[in-house]
Image (cartoon, rainbow, N blue to C red):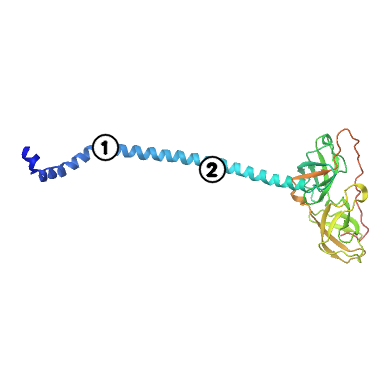
Amino acid sequence: MTVDHRYQYLDCLRDVLGTVVYPFQYLIHFPTYTKDWLDQNIAGRSALLRENARLREKQIFLNAQLQKLTTLEAENRRLRSLLESAVNSTDRMLIAELLAVDFDPYRHHILLNRGRRHNVYVGQPVIDQNGIIGQIIHVGPFTSTAILITDINHALPIRINRTGVRTLALGTGNFQELKLLHVPNNEDVKVGDLLVTSGLGGRFPRGYPVGVVTKSEPSSPFANIIAKPLAQLDRIREVLLLGSIPRGEEEITPKLVPAIVPPAGGRP
């Protein structure tokens, strides 16, 4: 032992013996190593699976919240547009939401969530951020029904903004079309002319946009003039009711604009 300690003569023998003994040491400790490895990997995999499931649930929740925020943002933009469309108007305003739509292709009626309790009255004009939509034809305690300007039983007094020509815009049963009645062939009407309310009849305020001319052709006995409404009548979500009467004041119930029956040959 002294010689080995001082002169290290047995190092080579010790190395040989260590090499021979190492496999036996490894085999003895192999079950312990295997157990530790399995515990670490199985526990780590379980933790990863739990973390993955938690993150997936969180992603689904956040996606649902994002959809809701997107919807609220779009609704906020629509409401801002509605309010901004009447910034310079002195008329009283009331925002209403769409509850139901009449699915008759020629009967363009919508149900709104405002009624007599909110001072809504028959004949009240209805607009959106782009222009005239229609008017109220029936009022209940909490809801009301509006007829759109494209209904075949609705006629709207309008004038051509560029020339001042006054006429009637008749609904055709098509959300994208209005027909201008009784315009002589020699009148100056061009595609792109803006149509606005004339204020005649005392129903609709003067100067609100209605549509633009998309077709103007000579015909017999009057010109064949078609206009496209500016309001997106087939995508209505919220509307503005003009001229709401405060409680305590006398409610005025004007008559409906009568349906216009054109002369023979004046309408397809």
Q: Position of residue 91 (x, y in %)?
A: 85, 44
Task: Between label 2 and label 1, give the one nearer the viewer.
Answer: 2
Q: Image quadrant for the C terminus?
A: bottom right
Which amino acid lies under the numbered mark 1 shown in the image of this protein?
Pro
Query: Extreme left residue here?
Result: 3
Residue visible at 19% across and 42% down in the picture: 23
User: What's the mark number on residue 143?
Assistant: none
Q: Quadrant of the N terminus?
A: top left
Measured as percent of width and height from the top left, residue 50 is found at 45, 38
Which residue occupies the foreground of this view, 184 or 153? 184
105 is higher (above) or lower (below) than 35: below
Residue at point 73% right, 46% down? 80
Q: Is residue 27 above or below residue 176?
A: above
Circle 2: is it few (<14), some (14-19), or many (20+) Cα within 10 Å? few
Farthest front residue?
6
Kindly indicate the quadrant of the structure image that contains residue 19. Answer: top left
Extreme residue toward the top, this view: 248
- Alpha-carbon span between mark 2 and mark 1: 41 Å
Residue type at tag 2: Gln
Q: Secondary structure at mark 1?
A: helix
**Where does the image place residue 225, in percent across and percent down from the top left?**
86, 61
Say which mark, if any, is on residue 31. Answer: 1
What percent of the width, then of the height, locates residue 126? 82, 46
Sequence-first disc among 2 and 1? 1
* Viewer-proximal residue among 222 and 63: 63
Quick one: SS at disc 2?
helix
Disc 1 residue crowd, few under 14, some 14–19, many 20+, Cα 10 Å:
few
Residue of label 2: 59
In the drawing, does residue 69 fall left or right of residue 163?
A: left
